[in-house]
Image (cartoon, helix red, strand yellow):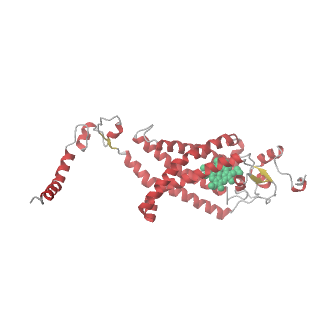
Amino acid sequence: MRHLRPFLLLAALLLAAPAVQAQLYQAPGPTSPTSKDQVELYAPHQDKEVGIVSIPDSKLAVLVQPEGREWRGFRTVILRWGAAIAILGMAGLLLLFYLVRGTIRIGEGRAGRTVPRFAALDRFAHWTTATSFLLLALTGLVVTFGRPLLIPLIGHPAFTTLAQSGKAIHNFLSVPFVFGILLMIVLWVRDNIPEKADLVWLKTMGGLFSKSGEHPECGRFNAGQKGIFWAVVLGGGALAATGFLLLAPFALTGIGGMQIIHVVHGALAALMIAIILAHIYIGSVGMEGAFDAMGTGHVDENWARDHHRRWYDEQVGKGRVDPPPAVRPHPAE
Ligand code: HEM
């Protein structure tokens, strides 16, 4: 019998456990409201349930926050569908545009002479912003679409590793992203001030469908590029600001404020990815000679005359255009 005593004690404990547990839950202390009735005594609001806590962090007294359901709906349904439609929709439009219009060619072909367009510092600013944005976008998409798309594909353990490292990358890259944007502002803002000629460019859509192949005149940046610049500065800036607030939860706002910040961050990110897809298209396969500007920093003279006539004339005036091959000095001279 003595040997059986520990087992009997364990059995008694196991049998008594549910009763003890129920007792614990039914008897909350005066400062720890855990039952619905008690909560409603403290805060008879319609459906928001707020209790009382004795610790300084008053938001911990919120037991039920109905807006949280709307936020979850945004997070799991609206954001996913919205982002998918914006990104895939833009990719589809670009593909269609490519099939209809093809690559925009340099009217008279390459001249073989070049004009310096972006200095090393310009390109450093661009590629710092671009690389960090692309990685921020990818890791952000892992967070948004991971559960429905990636977990079924790669399983929970691999997704955990991916999501954890993705989140670290996402947090860290906000710094070079902001740095790149600040540098772009310093370097390019004066060439991105809107002007009258932008209206003509917008009306004719940059001469995209003009029969003569003529492009409306413009300076260093056309209206479309100015749009990209301001989208990056303002949209990217707002993404960074909301991102930093998400990194420091409740620093400035309560629960509702955090939800609004998240909604703005998610919706803006989807919009920005779609806009940048269009930018990447036109800066690469969409337009002959465009990539050189950010690749080597030099563009072909005929490209510059086609797309940025006024800027080209200014460069000629400043003597920055390479002379035609016939009058080029001999390398030995
Ligand atoms: C990764 C692919 C990308 C490519 C191939 C690309 C290509 C280019 C090119 C060729 C230009 C110069 C156009 C000119 O001569 O005027 C340019 C400019 C610019 N890029 Fe990118 N870019 C990429 C990604 C990005 C990203 C991710 C951002 C920002 C988030 C960005 C922001 C800008 C801005 C603000 C400008 C100046 C305004 C403009 O020309 O539109 N780029 N890019």
Q: Residue 28 at what x, y percent from top left? A: 22, 42
- The quarter of the rendered structure image containing the N terminus is bottom left
Comparing 151 with 107, the one in front is 151
The residue at the point 90 percent across, 56 percent down is 326
Numbered label tally: 0
The residue at the point 49 percent across, 54 percent down is 165
Please state if 98 lies on the left or on the right of 21 as rendered.
Answer: right
Q: Residue furthest left?
A: 1
Please state if 88 lies on the left or on the right of 24 as rendered.
Answer: right
Quarter where residue 53 is shown: top left
Specify whether residue 289 is in view: yes
Q: Residue 126 at what x, y percent from top left? A: 65, 49
Q: Which residue lies furthest to the front in this view?
A: 2
Specify whether residue 193 is in view: no
Name above or below for residue 208 compared with residue 47.
below
Q: Residue 247 at what x, y percent from top left? A: 47, 44
Q: Residue 222 at what x, y percent from top left? A: 70, 48
Comparing 153 with 89, the one in front is 153
Comparing 12 with 237, the one in front is 12
Please state if 277 lies on the left or on the right of 263 as rendered.
Answer: right
Please state if 288 lies on the left or on the right of 12 as rendered.
Answer: right
Comparing 220 with 15, the one in front is 15
The residue at the point 16 percent across, 51 percent down is 19
The residue at the point 60 percent across, 55 percent down is 277
